[in-house]
Image: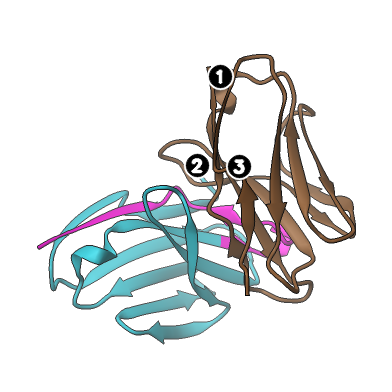
Chain colours: A cyan, B brown
Amino acid sequence: KNEVEQSPQNLTAQEGEFITINCSYSVGISALHWLQQHPGGGIVSLFMLSSGKKKHGRLIATINIQEKHSSLHITASHPRDSAVYICAVRGGEYGNKLVFGAGTILRVKS
Amino acid sequence: DAGVTQSPTHLIKTRGQQVTLRCSPKSGHDTVSWYQQALGQGPQFIFQYYEEEERQRGNFPDRFSGHQFPNYSSELNVNALLLGDSALYLCASLRTGGYGYTFGSGTRLTVV
């Protein structure tokens, strides 16, 4: 069992749909990161959360520390949102290293 | 302000050879981490360097070694390459006490 579980593994949506990607982890952490990876490999940091909720444009990220769960929402999805979305945690017994989920492959069709 | 720079972007090596990958961290960042990402999987932590010392290490064999220089740049060395070492190698930098990692675009290593 992975230390960081993401669901779904693959997601296909129609342009304009509301999208939710989930992330669960098993130990206490100090921060959770949502990352975006496009074909070719480069990773872009979307959010870093230690509590509550953050919003940037059409992206919203929430975290529930007690339940060890986070969600990434995309409102009014667009084909340019197609990418791999990865959840990663750090802190606690992990120290400074990031422990990654396997990623969610998102495809938004026009 | 340059982000994290990795070189080379791609390379092909033969089994048994040795390879060195390089990373220049974001300006102001002093901690460098290396990750291996196999196709279709999330990145796996290799090791982290701070103050020119390896501070944390993941579950990788001794064939994987690294170095950090006084200017905070870092190298990842892999000896006796195996086909299974084919992957995207990512470098991420962090400012001590900060929370935000900055990632490089990675080096795609193919071992044939």
Residue span colored magenta: A89-110
Secondary structure category for the residue under label 3:
loop
Disc 1 to disc 3, C-alpha distance: 19 Å
Question: Dot 2: within a 10 Å radius of its alpha carbon, few (fewer than 14), some, or many (20 or more) residues?
Answer: few
What residue is drawn where x is 34% and y is 84%? A57
Q: Is residue B66 above or below residue A12?
A: above
Quadrant of res B97: bottom right
Mark 1 belongs to which subunit? B
Q: Could you say where residue B88 lies in the image, as x and y percent from the top left?
A: 53, 40
Q: Is residue B89 above or below residue A16?
A: above
For label 1, the residue is: B83
What residue is drawn where x is 54% and y is 46%? B43
Disc 2 to disc 3, C-alpha distance: 34 Å
Secondary structure category for the residue under label 2:
loop
Quadrant of res B104: bottom right
Q: Is residue A53 above or below residue A8?
A: below
For label 2, the residue is: A1
Q: Are marks 2 and 1 on the same chain?
A: no
What residue is drawn where x is 45% and y is 84%? A53
Amino acid type, residue under disc 1 in the picture: Leu
Give the camera-side residue of A9 and A109: A109
Amino acid type, residue under disc 3 in the picture: Pro
Question: Dot 1: within a 10 Å radius of its alpha carbon, few (fewer than 14), some, or many (20 or more) residues?
Answer: few
Q: Could you say where residue B17 lies in the image, as x and y percent from the top left?
A: 69, 18
**C-beta proximity under 8 Å, tags 2 and 3:** no
Give the camera-side residue of A49 and A35: A35
Q: Is residue A36 above or below residue B40?
A: below
Question: Dot 3: within a 10 Å radius of its alpha carbon, few (fewer than 14), some, or many (20 or more) residues?
Answer: some
Point out the frontmost of discs 2 and 3: 3
